[in-house]
Image (cartoon, rainbow, N blue to C red):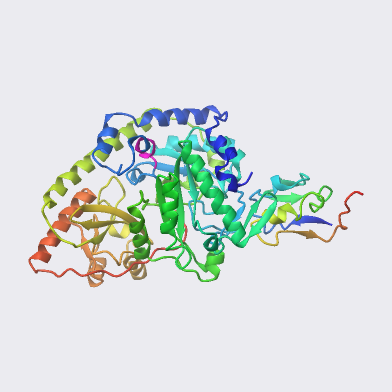
Amino acid sequence: MTLKIIASQCTSCSACEPECPNVAITEKNGTFVIDPKKCTECIGHFDAPQCAAVCPVDNTCVIDNAYPRYQAPA
Amino acid sequence: MTSLDVGTANAVEGVNAAVAMDDVMQKLAEHKGCGTSGGSGKASCGSGAGQGDLPTEIWEKVKNHPCYSEEAHHHYARMHVAVAPACNIQCNYCNRKYDCANESRPGVVSEKLTPEQAAKKVLAVASTIPQMTVLGIAGPGDPLANPEKTFKTFDLISRTVTITINMVDPEIGAKIYPWVFWKHKRYTGVEAAKLLTDRQLQGLEMLTERGILCKVNSVMIPGINDKHLVDVNKAVKSRGAFLHNIMPLISAPEHGTVFGLNGQRGPSAQELKALQDSCEGEMNMMRHCRQCRADAVGLLGEDRSAEFTTEKIMAMEVDYDLESRKAYQEKVEEERVAKVAAKQEELATLAGAASDIKLLIAVATKGSGLINEHFGHAKEFQVYELSTSGAKFVGHRRVDLYCQGGYGDEDSLETVIRAINDCHAVFVAKIGGCPKNDLIKAGIEPVDQFAHEFIEKSAIAWFKAYLDKVNSGEIEHQERGDAEIRQGALINAA
């Protein structure tokens, strides 16, 4: 799995962008998006996904069930 | 870096660092330095035109800043450029999704700017509005949570910092701040509030130690931090803040804030004034804050941001006219001196009068210290407290436009009366027959005989006559009731 940003709720405040340890977040068309190929749910970096922790709007940076769970490299 | 680092070495270095700026900003910075020097400025502050207890070196720095000097706010304009949207602290009076009605950074702006766009905007605005002397980065998030963007834009223009401090007690803080994000972790409750207050106070100390002027904003939240703000006032004064701005909570369900939704009320006009009065012995209080939007442009109380959208700015041929700005600023200094002289003269006539009576009056003004606004056109009233020691500016009351299209609208008149209900009189340049009668019925005396004269001089003259009438038994002095504070962030009133 990976996290995704619900575009309709994103305020484009950019708080998440510098927090991402994987540089997976970029601005596209006025809102921020997470690159599912780069997102590791912050596993191995931090206790909780940083984008969700800093986001000012609850339930905006959420787990995207469309992707399989991230596996930390052994 | 986060805004909890507000006073750590990082942030302070940011303030001091002369980050390379483009020519536009340099030009403005240089101009600001030279534009307002000269004898007339000294004359006005030397005669008590608003310097108050401020040391001269601080007064020189802030007298042309509308947010810091109540003298300046009629003459000099400010603009906020919205380059710093991120925030790492959640406040119960702010809803980042729609609007933060409180603070000088109501969270939503029409559009974000890059630092380069901001620079062009500053130049365009300064050329169009000669009063423009102040540039602020007011978010819409927390500017110090966006240090790179903020300081790239900020640089040399204005070396002052405002910190919002709503509490120094974590137990109280927990009721205001649901969470704080710091060092990769979201903290909640008392722990979050303790982190915040410790670092805010430390930050304030570090900034003032380095000679950076610090103003502290506090949002007054009845039942939560209202009494506590007296302690906050002491805490920030002892750490070198030079000005404290206590603002009323703006709270309504449609803002979608925690406080708006749970019915937390804001203070009444008298509650706010009582708190400001009780803190005043300690330090300078700011009473003219208009709680502007983060992208506001113009004089306090007006918002011309719609004239300066990115699209319009980029299309503008900017001709920066230093001469007209200089001429304007010299004229303002002359007006200031004249106003103070008039007040002193009138005040002398009050000498010897002894009375405990203190009362409030509302004034309709367009600025320049004159009673020069029609009652029905006033977007706000300035409130002065009159006593035998003179006329003192104690605040302002926003009102809906009462006169819309030439005919009187009764509902709006009621709004106006509620907003100035604690005043004994309202001074106007002109007023229609109907509202005049309604005001008298409500116990507020409409005064139009001082049209286009200086506010303080006129107020003192009127007060003297009032005292005479009370002393001769012609009228009986009665206390007035309380008044309402209008809700909603200041937007451009049509």
Q: Residue furthest right?
A: A74
Q: Please state which of residues B162 and B417 is positioned toward the viewer in this rendering.
A: B162
Image position, residue B369 (x, y; %)? 27, 47
Residue beneath the point at 23% across and 72% down: B441
Q: Does the rendering let one see residue B405? A: no
- The part of the chain drawn in magenta is B59-65
Reply yes or no: does residue B396 show up in magenta: no
Q: Does the rendering let one see residue A12? A: yes
- Name the image quarter holding residue B13: top right
Image position, residue B197 (x, y; %)? 54, 53
Image position, residue B459 (x, y; %)? 20, 54
Q: Is A6 rendered above or below residue B439?
A: above
User: Is B408 placed left or right of A17 in the picture?
Assistant: left
Q: Please state, as top left, top right, bottom left or bottom right, where the N terminus of chain B lies in the image.
A: top right
Q: Please state which of residues A57 and B90 is positioned toward the viewer in this rendering.
A: B90
User: Is B10 placed left or right of B318 in the picture?
Assistant: right
Residue beneath the point at 78% across and 45% down: A22
